[in-house]
Image (cartoon, grey):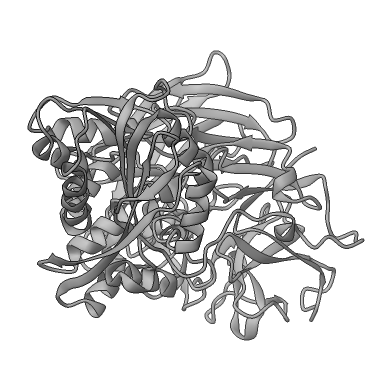
Amino acid sequence: MTGPYSDKAFTRAIPKVYETYLVPLLFEPYAVDLARRLGSRRVTRVLEIAAGTGVVTRQLAATLPKDVSIVATDLNQAMLDQAAAAGTARPVEWRQADAMQLPFADGSFDAIVCQFGVMFFPDKPAAFAEARRVLRPGGVFLFNVWDRIEENELADIVQTTVASLFPTDPPGFLQRAPYGYFDRPTIERDVAKGGFGAPRIDTVAARSRAPSARGPAVGYVEGSPLRNGAVVRAMRASRILRFAVAVVTVAIVLIVGLAVGVQMNQRQQGVAAPSPTATASPRTTTAPSASATPTVTTTTIYNDDFGFVITGGDGPPHAVIRKESSRASNGTTQFAPEAFAVSADGKEVAFWAKYSATPELHLLSAGTGAERTLVTLTADQRAGGVAWSTDGAALLYSIDTGCGICGGPIGATLNIYELAASGRHGTVVDTQTNTGWYRPIAWDRSANLAAAGLLVEGGSMALYVTFRIDTGNTFTAHRVSSNAGTGKLGILMQSVRASTDAKFALGVDFESGDIKWWPLADVTASKSQVGAGKRGAQWRPGTHEIGFMGPSDQFWLGDVDKAGSLGLCCTAFSGAPAGSTLRTFRADGTAVLLGVGDANPFLANYTLVRFGGDPKSTSGDRVSFQDLSGVLASVRLR
């Protein structure tokens, strides 16, 4: 199972795609405007905050006199590395820095510039106060933000398109972050709280042009943290592109920003000097407070021997484990996964950790929170996926290299890690070059059989590979690629998962939404349930039953061992909330959690249903609650 990235992290392949597609499309006109506004002033030392890949930095270096020193900072080192590689017309000091805690003495700069960065500050008045601290008397602070998303056609199309693909749980990055800080009274109030006077705010409109819809689609989906939503990441740009092309046949659209500027006099009060800013959707959202907590009632349906893995909110630690009857804000364990998998007994979580720039494979006890590092990657490697062996004594994991959409070679290795001290630690099972990235599916150690899929751009599984793994490090691979010679199996890689005993695997067809299931050893023997996987499909733990949403908001459980000519049968319960999607089963299979998206993209409404003795029960024992939108798995706490 894959956990989401933090949706404000500009890391991995994002900087290169961002620079290639988004900078010329969106940011260059405003960089020119911002540099022009500063160029009319006498300054000797300039600080740039949130420099990104250096589009404003390059303009400043070309526009300002050569004796003006420029210090360009960004929170993400990967963005600065891309900026430095692009170069500037004259020397610039590149420095990683947090806008909330600038590493400079009071009164160090004549001017501060920030292009489309203040929207990401977690505490904007505090960040403005920090900018004020390092400014000299009479200095100027220029920044821009986007106007409301409805005024920015490209972003609005992308947001609407993605929301239409995931109506029950739409990714909220564009609404919440880049296009979420446009209200002028709010900006004025935050600037005043930071110690400045009234700002001058100008609206700056520009026309953005691209030769086709592919550039904007790739840029927004692969070149921004929008790609970090788990579902969107699995889908990637290609599928969204089909919808984008249908809406934008010629990518010539209006982009609108607001320019905000404040100037300090000797008493460090402010008058305005313009700088562009952009907006997001008209409704801003914040991480849920008490109103986002579960509606807990006195009931025996909750079982606190078990808990949920929940992701969401703004930033680290990105995931929590909390008891069933609790809420995300009271999570007992916090961690930061890029991808994770829960052991068959539900007691442990293996995950690729995001604690540093170099990914690490960690092992976490769900009950105690104890955590240890198993594998540390090198700078040129990226975290792939991870799966448990059926006996809980080993892991099958993958490592990625390269970025297909960026150009250049790509590669992947599939590896094993046995938890015993004397076991194999990091042994390579197979290597792929320029074909895709491995995603582990399962490892049945009793049969010496493992399976993995090869993920390609677009999110589909291009290749299904099984391996015979013996104790002598002899690995025999069998590879299957079909679907009328297209090189794709037609299955969404993100949806593929194995039964608890790893005898079967299932996946959802990329186009039709059909559920497909097959013996782990032979994907060519797959069977299908037409259209049944559109709202999720998972194995019920400890069984060969597939859970999915049936017609009329019924929840179905179908035993593949008993599937007849009509497919999977039968109804487990009816009366599920309209539009429900399958989120997870309780780790022991005694209950199922369904979810429905909320108007607040941070939240979702959940229904936990305990299975009764009557498999055709019309109601079942259930309880409803609200929590963060990213409930992804169940674990056993004791």
| Residue pictured at 40% horizontal, 33% vertical | 266
| Residue pictured at 65% horizontal, 74% vertical | 556
- Residue 150 horizontal/vertical position (percent): 37, 74
User: 131 above or below 288?
Assistant: above
Q: Decide if residue 309 is on the left or right side of residue 452.
A: right
- Residue 108 horizontal/vertical position (percent): 35, 24
Image quarter for residue 229? bottom left
- Residue 65 horizontal/vertical position (percent): 10, 32
Q: Decide if residue 313 is on the left or right side of residue 586.
A: left
User: 372 above or below 43?
Assistant: above
Extreme residue toward the bottom, this view: 552
Extreme residue toward the front, this view: 266
Rendered-image quadrant of the C terminus? top right
| Residue pictured at 17% horizontal, 71% vertical | 251
Q: Nearer the viewer, residue 158 or 125?
A: 125
Q: Nearer the viewer, residue 40 or 597?
A: 40
The answer to whether residue 593 is seen in the rendering is yes
User: 571 above or below 333?
Assistant: below
Q: Nearer the viewer, residue 141 or 469?
A: 141
